[in-house]
Amino acid sequence: MTQQDTVQDTAASDGQALLEIDDLTMAFGGVVALKNATLTINTGEIFALIGPNGAGKTTVFNVVTGVYRPTSGQVRFAGGRIDGMKRFRVTKGGVARTFQNIRLFHNMSALENVMVGADAHHRTGAIGAALGLPWHHREERRGRELAREMLDYVGIGDRAGDVAKNLPYGDQRRLEIARALATDPKLLLLDEPAAGMNPAEKQSLQALIRKIRDSGRTVLLIEHDMGLVMHISDRVAVLDFGELIAEGLPHEVQNNARVIEAYLGAASDAS
Amino acid sequence: MADKTKNKTENKTGNWALNKSRISQATGRLGAGLDTLRTWWDGAQVWQRYVVYLLLVVGALILPAPAIGSFMSPESDWTTILIHPIGTYVLLAMGLNVVVGQAGLLDLGYVAFFAIGGYSLAYFGTEYGWNFWATLVMGTMMTGVSGVILGAPTLRLRGDYLAIVTLGFGEIVRITASNTDEIGGARGITNIPHPPPIFGTEFALDPAPYYYLIVSVIVVVIIFAKRLEKSRVGRAWAAIREDEDAAELMGVPTFKFKLLAFATGAMIGGLAGTVWAGKVIFIEPNNFPFILSATILAAVVLGGQGNIPGVILGAFLIAWIPERLRFLAEYRILIFGAVLVLMMAVRPEGLLPSGRRRAELAEGTGGMGAMGAEVAGPTATDAAIPEARS
Amino acid sequence: MFQDFIDQFGTSTVGGLAVGSIYALVALGYTMVYGVLRLINFAHSEIFMIGTFASLWVITTVGISSPLTGIALVGLLALMILVAMVASGGAAIILERVAYRPLRKKGASRLAALISAIGASLFLQELFALEVIPRVFDRPGRNQAAVPRIVDRDVLFSIGNADVRTDHVIIVIAALIMMVGLDQLVNRTRIGRGIRATAQDPEAAVLMGVSIDTIVRVTFALGGAMAGVAGVLYAMEFENIYYNVGFILGIKAFTAAVLGGIGNLRGALLGGIVLGLIENWGAIFLGSQWKDVIAFIVLVLILMFRPTGILGESLQQARA
């Protein structure tokens, strides 16, 4: 995973399977968070993962990004296995994420936050930095430029110098996305990106997600806002109690009886 | 009668409260003053900063002047004090700052690296007749390696555990030195070689050449430390300190960088040890007690960890004040302990914290939360424990 | 060399059990405070030291000149233990109030708390060296103080070639009684429930009406009292105390707490015993000057390979 495909190459292989989750089970002691989940995300699509609270959606993210090693099953990315791989290697390999509870580096500036992402492909190490070698400065400059680009890309370019924790909530979410984008991912995992946003913010988020996809990246998102999900997703999958209960086009899933039941409870339970 | 006593107690309580608020007012004003200084610095232009650097270098050159010495150290030789403890502590504090201040790793056994550096010169200088400079390089490398050896198994541990393990390591080094006759055992090593003459200046009994040597070393270390801080290395360290799991998920190889912090800090400590041993020419295991690790840690925290000027100031004060107040010599450690407790209660972010650190430490992000038991920091939630929702 | 081991196995095992019980008692204090506050109470070693000097004070005040037996011995021990528990427990409460509570209220970082703890530890050491020992005991503050023998070192019985002496038996029994008492308190009383609840989920505990301040205070007091008892037993056994007797012992006791599983009371007992045994057995091979290093190496190994300790469970997890 040291050679990076360029984004162009990925776009050319549109429709191919990018992320394959194969019979994945994740158990913590007695609690089974994911049971035999099988899912394929294709290159260039916007894929939404939905389900009631506690269904196991973030667990999927955690397994894919290497936070957990699966109890059984495999995760393949661009054909190669990544389950159990070290987290930073997964990121360097082209998978980046944002978090449900924002996890920015709160006391660093917005620009610095994104630069950390850009550093993922930085090759100069400590010696180059300490000795002030020319290629170190070059990479620093390039990283800084890339960081500014990403901030502009998500729409908070004017906030570059602000300390992350002082940013308004919506900007913080954008910053997280910018930081993840700076790692140049082929696959971007967004964990409830619209949480806490007002309708106007959600509109521009939709536009941003589409822009990200159109630039050649693939997006997998967890979301609770059904309007958003239906509007931008190419395909949707539904998790309930750790099991995949439906998968397909948005409107198919929306009308699926099992899905409705999962969200609202069985008819006899509804009072 | 009862009224009188009541009034008396009220007055006493009133006085106490008044004094307490006067003290906190005073510390508040001092703190505000220092913060203003820091804010000016953060916003200063490049040329302004270079002027300050120049002034500092000039200041360092004239610092040993007898006029200053008569005030700063009326009882003992000022230049000698400047070399040790002041110069040594400044170096050690800068090294520990890399570990604690930048990478956020709790190290309570830092004195071990000081010892390894000193003993390198002592052993190879006396047994094999190596000269100072060769041993300096060798000693620094050896300490760096020992930093990696210590760090490799222990850096996966949580903060408190890492602190205790490093404490243990510091003690292991000291006890081993004491029990190993090959390197002098409890009696130590004498006749450690001085540095060879540079540009004709001999390193003998006159402390002045040592002073300029240590100032040069300090300047070199400052330059390297600053460069690291501003590079991706420093950014990675800051990210690790803020939220290690998120950092790793953003592509930072956290373990590698933590190890690097340890090794870098170790090398600086070893450097300090070698230079110091070359001056004092006699070392023994009791030169490296735990309290020295605690003292350097205190210097880093008191000064305002994570930033170089703060740390230098902290080290300077911690080294100089006990020397200046020699008449209190017996009570030195007692007062030191009390000052530590007081400092943490009143201004835990230190004297000159960088703006970032002030925010981190004063409001308490992670650690002992207001509930009195730990409010789980970022590392305990999303990534580490099984998901209860979503 | 193995012959040495077999010869000395019995005696060193007995010795290991005794010193291990002392480690266990001190470890309880560390583990309880860590379970509730996630704080390593660095100054706990000085709380222990206070206990040793408190017991010496009792001995000199009562005026013991030769070893006691029977009821008199039990009476003296009881008195020493009582006084030491009050002294150490009280000191622990003051310590909490002065060095930790202000930080707790501010939500200070772990590093700040650690520094404060180190400061408190140094302060207490020096206080005793400079003021308390010279004034109360009329001797130089930094010298070792001999403790008069209060119990004869008779051999009570033998197992194989291991002699079990009276003092060993006293230590183990006293330690056991204390630990059973503490165990009962933590598991059967309201305040014990409060401690466990706070360790598990402080926010929920508050919602259930638990006063965190009280719980913290009680935790420190209990841990301190245990350390006080350890101080009595230490003074009796080693007959030699000094102002920083707590330093190395404190680190070993913390090792024991981690070894058994931090936050776990039974783990502290187990960890203490195991550490005492390993130390003594190891000393047969390496010589006693390496005893301390053995303890540290155990610490490093445990933290590397099984940081949750032998029993793993901790105070805040549901009891099986």
Image: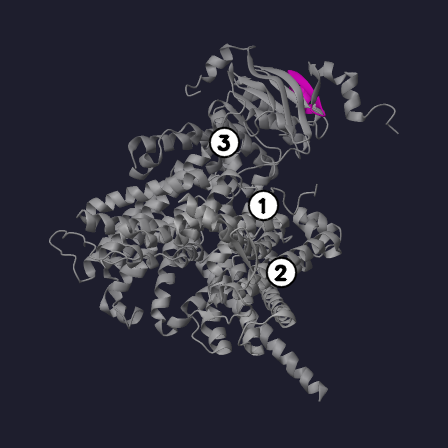
Give the residue pinned by disc 1. C261
Q: Quadrant of the N terminus of chain B?
A: bottom right
**Distance Cα–Cα, label 1 vs label 2:** 23 Å
Q: Chain of mark 3?
A: B
Looking at the image, do the residues carrying marks 2 and 3 touch, with CB atoms under 8 Å apart?
no
Measuring 24% from the left and 64% from the top, which residue is drawn there?
Answer: B79
Measuring 68% from the left and 18% from the top, which residue is drawn there?
Answer: A237
Looking at the image, do the residues carrying marks 1 and 2 touch, with CB atoms under 8 Å apart?
no
Q: Earlier in the sequence, mark 1 or mark 2?
A: 2
Looking at the image, do the residues carrying marks 1 and 3 touch, with CB atoms under 8 Å apart?
no
Q: Residues within 10 Å of mark 1 (few under 14, many from 20)?
A: many
Q: Secondary structure at mark 1?
A: loop
Instruction: Report the mark closest to the observer, 1 or 2.
Output: 2
Give the residue pinned by disc 2. C174
One can see residue B107 in this view: no
**Distance Cα–Cα, label 2 vs label 3:** 55 Å
Q: What stretch of residues is rendered in magenta?
A: A228-242
